[in-house]
C-alpha cells in the first residue's frame, strides 16, 4: 500500500511540474505577443531584429523583473531624459507576460 501511495505521489508531482512548465511557456509566448502588439521592436531590438535605440538581448541579466516593469510603466522614473514611451495602462496580465518574456533574454 505504501509503495502504491509513493508512486501516486511521484506521478502527481511530475504532472504538476509539467503543468507549471506548460503554463510558464504560455506566459513567455504571450509576452512575445505583447512585445509585437505594442510595437516594442520599433525602438528595441532582440538578436539584431528591430530598432537600434536599445537592444534588449541581455535585459534579463541586467535588470530585476521589478525594474523591467518600472521601465515599461514609468520610464522617466528610471531615467529622467529617456525618450521611451510610458505604458502605465498596460493590463496587469500583459505587463506580467511581457516582463516574463524579457526576463528570458539573458
Image (tube, rainbow, N blue to C red):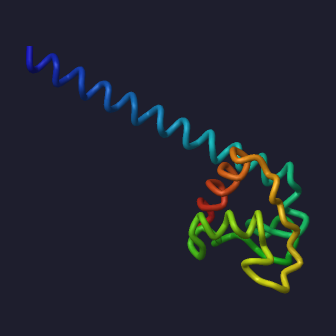
Q: Is residue 60 left or right of residue 16?
A: right
Residue 43 location in percent, x, y? 88, 69
Q: Residue at x 56, y 72 (%)?
A: 61
Residue 23 location in percent, x, y? 55, 37
Residue 11 location in percent, x, y? 29, 25
Q: In the rendered image, which quarter contains the C terminus?
A: bottom right
Which of the 4 image quarters holds residue 74?
bottom right
Q: In the rendered image, which quarter contains the N terminus?
A: top left
Q: Is residue 95 left or right of residue 50?
A: left
Which of the 4 image quarters holds residue 71?
bottom right
Q: Residue at x 15, y 16 (%)?
A: 4
Would you place residue 41 above or below residue 55 in this image? above
Residue 40 location in percent, x, y? 84, 61
Residue closer to the observer: 97 or 57: 97
Q: Residue at x 68, y 63 (%)?
A: 69
Q: Is residue 42 left or right of residue 1?
A: right
Q: Residue at x 66, y 67 (%)?
A: 68
* Farthest residue, direction bottom: 81
Which of the 4 image quarters holds residue 15?
top left
Would you place residue 7 above or below residue 35 in this image? above
Amino acid at each position: 500500500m505504501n509503495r502504491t501511495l509513493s508512486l501516486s505521489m511521484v506521478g502527481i508531482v511530475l504532472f504538476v511540474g509539467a503543468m507549471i512548465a506548460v503554463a510558464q511557456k504560455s506566459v513567455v509566448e504571450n509576452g512575445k505577443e505583447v512585445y509585437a502588439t505594442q510595437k516594442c521592436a520599433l525602438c528595441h531590438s532582440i538578436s539584431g531584429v528591430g530598432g537600434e535605440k536599445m537592444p534588449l538581448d541581455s535585459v534579463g541579466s541586467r535588470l530585476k523583473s521589478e525594474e523591467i516593469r518600472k521601465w515599461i510603466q514609468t520610464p522617466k522614473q528610471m531615467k529622467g531624459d529617456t525618450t521611451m514611451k510610458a505604458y502605465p495602462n498596460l493590463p496587469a496580465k500583459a505587463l506580467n507576460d511581457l516582463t516574463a518574456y524579457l526576463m528570458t533574454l539573458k
